[in-house]
Image (cartoon, grey):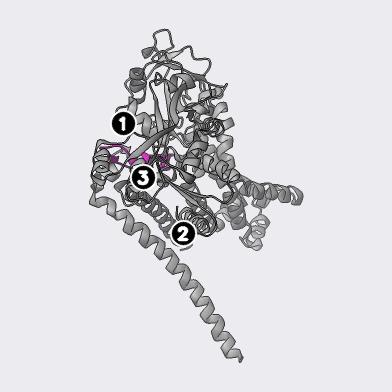
Amino acid sequence: MSRKRIDLFSRVLVTVAALLTMVILFGIFFFLISDGVKVFGKISLKDFFLSTRWYPTYEDAEFGILALLSGTLAVTGLTLLISIPLGFISAIFLAEFSSRKTHDFLKYVFELTAGIPSVVLGSFGLKYISRWLMELFPMKVWTGLNILNASLMLSVLAMPYFVTLIEDALKAVPVDQKEASLALGANMTSTLFRVLIPQARSGILNAIILGTNRIVGETMVVLMIAGGATMIPQSIFDPVRPLTAAIAGEMGEVELASTHYFALFMIGVVLLMISLIFTVTAMRLKRGMRR
Amino acid sequence: MKSFGIVVILIMLVGTTLGSTLVIKGSNTVYPIAQLWAEAYKEINPDVEISIEGAGSSTGIKALFNGQTDIANSSRWIKSSEIEQMNQDGKYFIPFIVAYDGIAIVVNKSLEIENITVQQLYDIYSGKATTWNQIDSSLPKVRIVPLSRDNASGTFEYFVEHVMKGEKLAPQVQQLASTRAEVEQVMQNRYAIGYIGMGYITEDVKALTVENIEPTVANVNAGAYPISRPLFMFVDATDGFPTGIIGDFLRFVLSPEGQSAVLSVGYVNAYGLK
């Protein structure tokens, strides 16, 4: 084969692979949406998005997802509140303040943490965290399976993402910038906040996007320990049933092509939208930062 | 589900080439115990192939009408419309009670309550009673934590139908993904209450009497325990009492060995054992 042919061959191969990924992605979008929108033939947009009543299996069934949606948002929000600061501090420590040995050891620990299957975290939350929460706050916690429990376990899942990616972002800042700052007499703290973090913000934002999408989509943990109550939470000790838990809990027994079935697909579309809106917003922000 | 369907087809294909095949369809509630029986039966009769499908009681009986199944599992008695159709088609289906589905009401061992009525259960799960002193004035004024199974579970369906009379559960009722999780929560939470299949009662929780009747095998068999129901297998006996592999399988199901397997999936045996 001539060189040109080899070149052509590999170019075709790469293009086909890229196209295939796109086809698969849009195929999933298409099927999800085309099944999902059928639910609006049976119930109105208003009843679907603005009602809190999710009673899909009764004779006079109701398909309002507002309570489920609020569950997803509550769990995701609290998880971010816990895991971003912790992840951020750990990443700064790893990138700038740790010795080689501690660095390697901690990095190893985080990698191990990233490998914990979510069902194991769920079981842990079910058996231990739930009990501890009730013992720690006996007045406030009326059920051990609640937003806080799920958020704690989800933080364990999300932390390695934040730590690893934020550390990479900090490390990617050119060394001469850091050294220039230090040479000008700035101490490490102001170098960190005035030079390193501003320079790394695009990478940090990227870490937050990836981590958040991971949290929103996580299913097993919330199915097992978020509490499963279809109510709008008033506190972090209330139980909720996030969108993913509803899909996972109900898809197995749902009658094909029923309103319930289409409603579950529409929930899938809603999840997709949440992650899309989030990603696009973050990308906009990133572009704004570069200017 | 798709892979499951492929497995079923494969099993049926293998069955047609090797030996006799038994097809079982119907109730999702009966499905887990039917699966256990099929496995045990196959161990004794290795060349028999059994395909089981959980698709709902009505689907099972429909399949019996058009000859697509040998045995129809059902968690309910036959409907009058189905009896009419039997008359029209000149068919005769006979029922076997193969097990009972009894629901136990469990609370934490430290909660000082021994009995509950169906009306009180209704009040708790519909949100009309929210603190324990509303159930019994000697109990503390603490929030009741009602636990339920996912709405995909057969136990949930039965509970809603017979205790709630079709009415919806209150929003704060927690739907848990497994019976194990329910038991775990009742063990941990002094003020939780849950309903579980009777076979899942453990030493770690307290099973209440319902309308002063204990959730025992004897009481369920006698039809005295209020929240229990028989589970059926229907077979076509138009051409005579089931013989061959169908009859043999039913004999195994009703044998002491078959019946002793029932408790392990949370149900109550219909015959023989205490």
Q: In the image, what residue type sits under mark 2?
A: Lys
- Identify whether A2 is placed above or below A234: below
Residue B20 lies left or right of residue B117; in this view the side is right
* Subunit under mark 3: B
Q: Which of B267 and B12 lies nearest the eye of the viewer?
A: B12
Is-magenta flag for residue B194? no
Going from N to C along the chain, the mark reached first, 3 or 1, is 1
Separation (CA) of disc 2 from disc 1: 47 Å
Q: Which residues are magenta?
A: A56-74
Separation (CA) of disc 3 from disc 1: 45 Å
Question: Are circles 3 and 2 on residues that touch, CB within 8 Å?
Answer: no
Is-magenta flag for residue A60? yes
Furthest-front residue in view? B240
Q: Which residue is mark 1?
A: B168
| Tag nearer the camera, 3 or 1 | 3
Mark 3 and mark 1 on one chain? yes
Residue A13, given in percent of the width and then of the height, sits at: 53, 78
* Subunit under mark 1: B
Q: In the image, what residue type sits under mark 3?
A: Asp
Q: Residues within 10 Å of mark 1 (few under 14, many from 20)?
A: many
